[in-house]
Image (cartoon, rainbow, N blue to C red):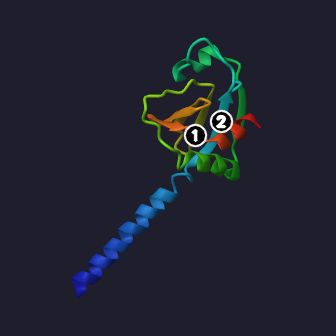
Amino acid sequence: MKKFNILVFFFIAVTFFACKSESSSNDDVQSIKFKFTELGRETQFRITCDKFDYYFPEGKEKNFNKKPGVDSVMQLLTGMKMVSDGTEPDVRGKIYITHTTKAVDTVCVGAKVLSYKGTTYETPQDLLVLIQK
């Protein structure tokens, strides 16, 4: 019976820490910066993420430094639908997510798809609305 109690305790502890680390992922985000140009702006070729700053050096910027704003953006970035048909974003904006550790994640945003942590997703329409507000 003592072994059973230890196993139950261990299972509960592991579950608690797993849930805690999952929920704290947004807690370590310090700020978010959008840099963007007009999302409907057409060009003769697709703009890649690494060339965005070259072609649009004077993009508009929007910053979120307070927890409610940061949380609202992070919520839009969770639960996105993956795209696996080889589509790449025609980049019209970047989102810089700065963590408390000073690490920065970059999201490359196109009107139809975006790239985040090496994966392509459908761009949430609510995110586009928030960027252009």
The percent coordinates of residue 83 (x first, y second) are 47, 37
Residue closest to the eye, 118 or 21: 118
State how many labels appear.
Answer: 2
Task: Indicate the amino acid at tag 1.
Answer: Thr
* Residue 107 numbered tag: none
Relative to 9, 20 lies left or right: right
Residue positioned most to the front: 85
**Marks 1 and 2: in contact by CB < 8 Å?**
yes
Residue shown at 43% from the left, 28% from the top:
86
From this view, report whether residue 25 is shown above or below residue 38.
Answer: below
Which residue is nearer to you in this view: 95 or 83?
A: 83
Rendering coords of residue 15 (x, y %): 39, 68
Q: Could you say which quadrant of the image residue 27 lies in?
A: bottom right
Residue at image coords 23%, 88%: 1
**Residue 98, labelled with which disc?**
1
Image quadrant where one finds the C terminus = top right
Residue 70, visible in the rendered structure: yes
Question: What crowding class fits label 2: few (fewer than 14 Cα within 10 Å), some (14-19), or many (20 or more)?
Answer: some
Question: In the rendered structure, which amino acid carries the disc numbered 2?
Answer: Lys
Q: Vertically, is 129 above or below 111?
A: below
Q: Secondary structure at mark 2?
A: strand
Placement of 104 over or under 5, stated as above or below: above
Q: Residue at x 45, y 63 (%)?
A: 19
Q: Earlier in the sequence, mark 2 or mark 1?
A: 2
Residue 22 in picture, x, y percent from top left: 47, 57
Q: Position of residue 74 (x, y in %)?
A: 59, 47
Which residue is outermost to the bottom? 1
User: Which residue lies most toward the right here?
Assistant: 133
How far apart, in angstroms, are the residues tagged by discs 2 and 1? 8 Å
Question: Dot 1, crowdedness within 10 Å: few (<14), some or many (≥20)?
Answer: some
Say which residue label 2 marks: 33
